[in-house]
Amino acid sequence: MKYYLTTSILYTSGRPHVGNIYEVILADVVARYQKLKGCTVRFQTGTDEHGLKIMQNAAKAELSPKDFCDQIAGGIKETLGKLNIEYDKFQRTTDEDHCAAVSAIFKKMFEQGDIYKSVYEGWYCIPCESFFTDSQLDGSEVCPDCERPLQREKEESYFFKLSKYTDFLRQHFAENPDFLVPEASRNEMIKNFLEPGLNDLAVSRASFDWGVETFDPEHVVYVWLDALFNYLTGLGYNPDKPTTELQEEFWPADLHILGKDIARFHTIFWPAFLKSLDLPLPKQVYAHPWFLFGDGKMSKSKGNVIYTEDLIDVFGAEAVRYLMLREMPYDHDGHASLETLVERYNTDLANIFGNLFKRSISMLQQYLGGQLPAEFKPNELAEQVVDLSNHVAQEVDTLLTKFHSQESLQKIWDLLRRLNKFIDETEPWVLAKKEGAEAELGQVLFVLSAGLQSAAIMLQPFMPETSRIILDTFGTEQRAFADANNFGQGLAGKKLIDDAPTLFPRLKMGEVEAKFKQ
């Protein structure tokens, strides 16, 4: 089975913060999960590199727009590497093949009558690269997406006949209730855009030249028409060339993951553009909520921006992946601060998880020389753990098909807490001193080992390096996602390869705060 997913591409107007990076981590989780289910996966991310804001920021940095984008894109790729993001394609909208394809797309839409020249008069948000009519703003002069001031503009522009596709989009939403999730985003698109009817969309700019060229030397392509087609040009699509093998294999995309603030572009504009070219629509769009740090949505002007590299330096990449996924609900905004992240790290990672692994392996080495029993004979108490582990594996499997990463982690931590309780209930240190209790002790340590194995298998999409360390310690080959639902498979008679490392050393709040003040 094939599975193609993308993130929205990161805008290279400046260094991205953790709110921008969250969806790439989530997409990596989905991609790894699908691979563990046996799918052939293609995962694409990248950078959006045209538009007025980038041209302005490049000028401030005393760089050409391309050199500025090269610098930012290089930094993004470095950050994704630190986070162990396994993408297959990093698509830049300044790549020559992408630019050539977008120019051809613009020309084809014009020649078939879906693009025409007129004059645009209305409001424009430079940071969001968004156009708004007076009726959409209801007297306001601030962007409804980013809440920054809009500027009034009047210029010659080419327009896409978006209004022509109103009925098509209404029908598509009605017939495909899971096309856009969660439900709040779907309802917003229907109520605010489809029910009132769509206006034609300005799809070129003549007031600056940093963009994809068109057949008209006075105009460049509007950045959103340019950017959205990266999902196809990354598969080699160009309307003037034969269909590529990658396009045949992976289009339509199974999933676009993006922030809720750009759902309009991906579920109103993008399907209309695709319909214009008689191309299949993506199967599903997940518009995730915002990752809020401190006081509201992250913004440089508010001074509440946290950069991913800084978090990695303090917490480590595996912990950053966990913390961001654990603090972000499926359908409403996630809130975090340094205090909550340190508390979550110490509680979940250092105490519940890291300490459980260290204690279990240390006892196995000390009491049994690292050798697991040749046979598993669970008693009633052990069966409770087995049943919970298998139940959690089934639940997480279901939750991940719907991108519920936070709930998935909550379930896995339910299992880890139960394993900690199991230690308190069985007191292995007492059994080790009790004459004739060797077999019982072996069974206790088998339960702990098998529970950790199951948890590590389920955690592979979320924390791949930590999971690898645990599974390598047991020397187990059972790593497909389905193996998590087969408690203790492959562990009987196994001898540990190594002592357990300390996975997550505890952090002190004062030291963490000091590092962020440097």
Image (tube, rainbow, N blue to C red):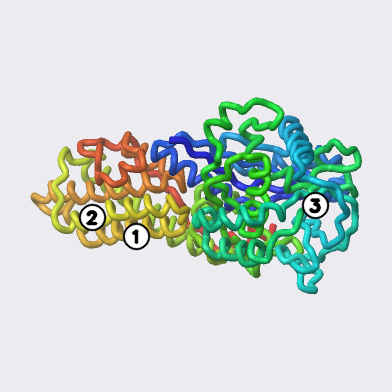
Number of other residues with Cα within 10 Å of mark 3, as a class: few under 14, some 14 to 19, many 20 or more: many
Mark 3 lies on a secondary structure that is: strand
User: For the residue marked with disc 1, what is the amino acid?
Assistant: Asp
- Give whichever of 59, 89 is nearer the camera: 89
Going from N to C along the chain, the mark reached first, 3 or 2, is 3
| Residue at point 50%, 62% (across, down) | 329
- The quarter of the displayed image where residue 227 is located: top right
Q: CA distance from mark 1 to mark 3?
A: 51 Å
Q: x, y percentage for residue 371?
A: 23, 38
- Quadrant into which the C terminus falls: bottom right
Instruction: State the residue position of label 2.
Output: 387
**Most foreground residue, 428 or 75:** 75
Tell me which amino acid carries mark 3: Ala
Choose the circle earlier in sequence order: 2 or 1. 2
- Residue 59: % across, % down: 88, 47
Task: Please provide percent x and percent y for residue 163.
Answer: 72, 55
Mark 3 or 2: in front is 3
For badge 2, the amino acid type reads: Asp
- Disc number lying in front (2 or 1): 2
Cα gap from disc 2 to disc 1, whole angstroms: 13 Å
Residue pointed to by mark 1: 414
Q: Is residue 465 visible?
A: no
Q: Is residue 40 left or right of residue 172?
A: left
Mark 2 Cα shell of 10 Å, populated few (<14), some (14-19), many (≥20): few
Discs 3, 2 touching: Cβ within 8 Å: no
Residue closest to the eye, 379 or 235:
235
Are the two marked residues, 2 and 1, in contact with CB atoms closer than 8 angstroms?
Answer: no
- The residue where tag 3 is placed is 202
Of discs 1 and 3, which sits in the foreground?
Answer: 3
